[in-house]
Image (cartoon, helix red, strand yellow):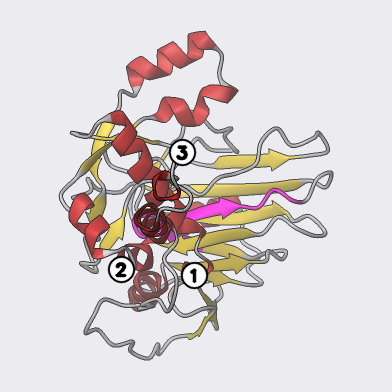
Amino acid sequence: MTIAENPTTNPETRLRDARTVDEAVVEGPRTLRRLAEGQESAPYRLFEARPLGPVVGAEIHGVDLREEISEELRAEIHRALLEFKVVFFRDQPITSDRQQQIARMWGELETNPFIDQGDDAVIARFAKGKMPPSYENVWHTDVTWRREPALGAILRLVEVPPQGGDTMWADMAAAYDNLSEDVKARIDGAVAEHDVIPGFARFLDRERLLEWQDRFPPVHHPVVRTHPETGRKTLFVNVSFTTRILGMEREESDALLRHLFQQAHVPEYQVRFRWEKNSIAFWDNRATQHYAVNDYHPHPRVAERVAIVGDRPY
């Protein structure tokens, strides 16, 4: 083999490989817009919203969730939810019943047959104790295996570990904005399959897997979702439930999905929330992915979540 034929020294091969790397990791400055292009942030009159980053996450101060929430206050909280994608409330000693009452102001509540329940069927309870952790979490959007994935969710920690146990969110509109034009051209209009079985296969025996497979067949969603309220294009695939892009050969689909999954890992699109006793998080499931950091073993961490029924992505 001559030097020109050696793939490690051939300039054209090295240039091709460099382009491949550039597709996987976009370097340089990124476009970081909290709102849709042309929109401006307006002041909040009924509370103070303190942004935690350039695109996603804000703490809301001046609201007591134990008190009645007027329609005017609900509208302002909703506007903050659309702007920041996840909003946080500190020092909110609310009950499970009150958590449900607040969530119902945004719609009907859904149940999840794959997660342990709390005192009510609509409460998903995540309890980890002194046993060694069985798995590490992954970046994901909740219940995309449903035909109508959740609009959003409200989470409160019943028991907070002395350290660790943070939750992170990623803005998937920012992730879409910063894809290369070539990748955007490949995925705009594309449809992906979402399946509950791969995400829960390690936790269920074969008999239960077959039962759930019949009850929850795979569904199809656009790879790029248009947010129904903001109109922003949002990357809508996740490693837990998205299995393939329709109309592509498996190898091409797998490679493209790996690239798209990686976008949630970009720190510029993320916010990290450190839980304290009586803290609350409310996120827009249509615009984000999240990750519960599993770094608190052997300390217990107990969380309860209520999820709000959403609509069909388009």
| Residue drawn at 70 percent across, 47 percent down | 302
| Residue drawn at 54 percent across, 68 percent down | 271
Quick check: is 94 in the magenta stretch?
A: no
Quarter of the figure with residue 26: bottom left
Report how far apart the C-alphas of labels 1 and 2 lie in the structure.
22 Å
Who comes first in sequence, dot 1 or dot 2?
Answer: 1
Helix, strand or loop for disc 1: strand
Residue 260, horizontal then vertical, whole percent: 37, 51
Label 2, residues with CA under 10 Å away: few <14, some 14-19, many ≥20? some
| Residue drawn at 34 percent across, 53 percent down | 151
Residue 297, horizontal then vertical, whole percent: 80, 45
Q: Of the numbered discs in the image, which one, if any, rests on residue 177?
A: 2
Helix, strand or loop for disc 2: helix
Amino acid carrying mark 3 in the image: Ser
The residue that mark 3 highlights is: 240
| Residue drawn at 36 percent across, 30 percent down | 195
Q: Which residues are magenta?
A: 282-295
Amino acid carrying mark 1 in the image: Val
- Against 145, residue 75 (above or below) is below
Amino acid carrying mark 2 in the image: Asp
Report how far apart the C-alphas of labels 1 and 3 lie in the structure.
24 Å
